[in-house]
Amino acid sequence: MTQVAEPGAQRWMGGGLVRKEDPKLITGQGRYTDDIALPGMLWLAFARSPVAHANIASIDTSAAKELPGVVAVYTGEELASEWAAAMPCAWPVSSRTYPGENTHDPRVPDHWPVAKDRVRYMGEIVAVVVADSREHAMDATEAVDVDYDELPVVTDIEAASAEGAHIIHEQFGSNELYTWELHNGDVDKVFAEAPVVVKERYFHPRLVANALEPRAIVVQPVPAQGEFTVWTATQIPHFVRVFLTLILGIPETKLRVIAPEVGGGFGSKLEVYGEEFVAVALARKLGQPIKWNEYRSEGYLSTVQGRGVVQDMEVAATEEGKLLGVRAKLQADMGAYASLVGPGIPILGAFHYHGTYDCDAYSFTCTSVFTNQTPTDAYRGAGRPEATYATERIMDALARRVGKDPAEVRAMNFIPPFDQPRMTAGTLEYDSGNYAAALDKAKELVGYDALRQEQQANDGRRDGKLLGVGISSYMEVCGWAPSQVLGTLHYAGGGWERASVRCNPTGKVTVISGTSPHGQGHDTTFAQIVADALGVTPDDVEVLHGDTSVATWGLDSYGSRSLSVGGVTIQKAAERVREKARVLAAHELEVAEDDLEWTDGKFQVKGAPDRAKTIPELAFSAWGAHNLPEGFDPILEGAAAFDPPNWTFPSGTHICVVEVDPETGSTRIDKYVAVDDCGTIINPLIVDGQVMGGVAQGIAEALYEEALYDENGTLLSGNMMTYRIPSAAELPGYTLDKTVTPSSTNPMGVKGIGETGTIAAPPAVLNAVADALRFVGVEFIDKPASAEKVWRVVAEARGQAPAERTPEGGGTGAASMTPEAEGGTA
Amino acid sequence: MRRIACTVNGVRREAEVEPRLLLVYFLRENLGLTGTNVGCDTSSCGACTVMMDGLSVKACTVLAVQADGSEITTIEGLASNGQLHPLQEAFRRNHGLQCGFCTPGMIMAGLGLIESGAGMEEEEVRLGLEGNLCRCTGYQNIVKAIQEAAGEMRQATPAGAQGGSE
């Protein structure tokens, strides 16, 4: 049994249909890029810089070329003639005052697929080996001899923009990419006159996406035709094709880019990477198939990272806690170059640092800088988690300052329920929302009042642990579009989607989608939409995507756009098929089109339900073409494009309950409640899956994960042993519920759910940890609230603070952490 | 090079292998069984988990030469006679997978756990899956799927459920 939904007016949408894509994935038949092997295939491996900043004095590849199986070795200079241009930045943000003009051109330094004369981060590619096997290629990278003249290293965000900092790209005269401002209302006056001003500083460590499938590329050239088929583990096959054309000069018509099964992305595969350009260039140069598969520790250095932001967050309020103004100042770490959309990531959050609340005055400023670290770019949520964290943490700080419960301060500041677009202080027009409903539901589910009473009765203790409750009443922005607005933000691409739907002669339906999945279940959700539109079952529908020769047009998957842009487009295309079928139905039933009604998945003559035609019936007779209306095209096919008028704005409340052990610093999540509003729900099973996965990643960000660099620009947490990804053993179960306020942006009322968990969860968890720690006098704690950090702040609050990272004899807690003590107790 | 012979998914396989070849690459590249995935290089993620002589092992921590003489079941060998294994059914029914990359390893780890006779309370299953990482699902549905499948398998064969390799 695969189909769970009950037949009804909307027969399939809204039902928890088990996924169509699962059978291949649970049997080992899913075909990921690394599963592809071609006859005569050569392997690529990359020699990478072990230092963060240096001039390349010399490279000697002669020893590497002599090793067994090595076909060729190339340096950046030797490949320079392959590139028509440097690697792309599609969102080159420039400085601006507000209101005002751009103050300088966007600062986009040349970033070559292989470094020519200087490296600017550890892991930057300096040479490429081609060999007959993975092992031979990797062995030879070790034999590439590079002389580096090391340069001063800049890793700290604030130090990067300080006077006298070493400049990473000299042509710009500083390490600053841009300072970008947005102001609304008389911010200075509101803050000067407000009775209450609360200010906190938050730091978002760099994060590594760790999609479980490492990146991989396979290229099949057809030299005589100048053609290339490129399989790549990417979220964005269409962008890959465009940029392969622009950088390598291969006509789009000669390129077929395929994103086969893709094992997770989370933004890390929203990039066109140097390895992709090199693989295609060498397939062209050598005329043989080429393969590269990233090994995980390599990915920690070479795959874009997320976050890397310092925020100074301020709110102005009345003594009662009513919000008057919001002022956010950011410094963001772009890493060594401007990645595909990296400069725009902080701007994605720029417009909603007031979240689900409103205020009179709003100000956002972000200064983004280069550092000698791996470039940053989108990571699940991209700009919105940063904004939401600041908003939701400062609301707790405000509640503490005015002496009220955090839930009460939120409730009194919520934008009231609305179902039509509403302008807000950050100059965004939200589509719809009912924030109080979600908060109320979440409070009820978690037993909020009882938890507060328990805290009060026991001075925050529960079985020797500290009990904390944290709220996050978030909103976010989904559905990456509208093209015109993206243009005003200097984003290079559009935001539309395109799809086509065809009912084949025997009644099976083919859908061609411009967005392609990397785990989100597009095949199932889209099949449900089309099944309802055409009166068939989801089993009758095949969804094709991720192959530019099949899905020629599309702008791919990121920014929670697959349903609210892509899915809506598919519904429109399916409706075109239905309207075309109506013409034929009227012809065959010998009635006027107006005399037909679409009921129970078929066209019926009004008042004569036994006279009816289904779309599969009509598709077959259209194909036979024996009796068609004048000029009727015999294929029941329809295409549509959709460029929505606005974004969508999911929202909700998450509440996290933690028990923190003040002796060890470890945090256990006792309960996690998520009440989300993603508008109309097509498949609740998939929606819940997205929420749980997103929350897990958000908890990981809150408690465990951090890409930690030392002052030399060396990544210390550079593999899965040192970078702590939580397993099932560390994570809790989740209690999920929904509220539904349909979006006013699109006809389906859908909003998006892929990123909400990662956006909502970190502040819920940190607010809970901070709430617990207040019972031992801790004033403040930031991400990640690792056991070590919690233990440290607790020790500091108790006045027994060892400041060093390796504590030696600094009180009982410290002693228990020394290796000697561990050995002694073993 | 060394000659090895082992039984994989019920079929006897012999091969000349380099001593440094990992079992996971032997399965993927020599035998073409690409259902077993490689997600890391530190034996952290568990995507390559297979059953070897009745125990779940990470195939990246075993050399192919160590598998000489052993009996191995991979994800491809789990369904039998066209019938999905209860674990496969349960993963699908419970939406225990999204991108699917960790799934073969998760299913084999679940099988190892169930066959070891471990307790199937939620906390026990969670601890038992400590060596397998999933970046998509948040684990809840994976845990649920393994619990459900264990119930079915233990009811069917109270002495311990069977793998698909016989």
Image (spheres, coloured by chain):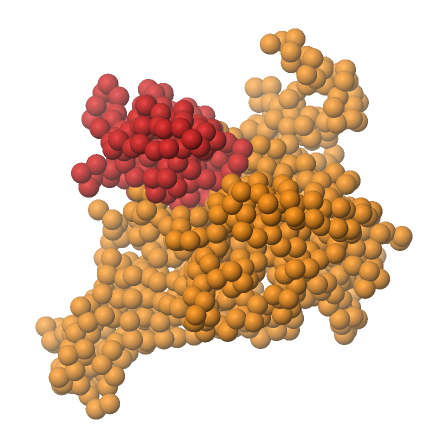
Chain colours: A orange, B red
Residue B99 x, y percent position in the rendering:
42, 47
Q: For this view, does A549 lie left or right of residue B13?
A: right
Q: In the figure, is residue B152 to the left or right of A353?
A: left
Closer to the camera, A605 or A714? A714
Q: Does B63 sit left or right of A397 as displayed?
A: left
Q: Residue at x 59, y 68 (%)?
A: A247
x and y percent of residue A291 in the render?
48, 52
Name above or below for residue A803 compared with residue A471. above
| Residue A720 on image: x %, y % | 56, 36
Please, is residue A589 above or below residue A385 in the view? Answer: below
Can I make out residue A110 in this image?
yes
For the point 50% across and 49% down, the residue is: A43
Q: Quadrant of the N terminus of chain B?
A: top left
Q: Residue furthest front?
A: A66
Outermost residue on the right side: it is A164
Residue A233 appears in the picture as rendered = no
Quarter of the image with the C terminus of chain B is top left
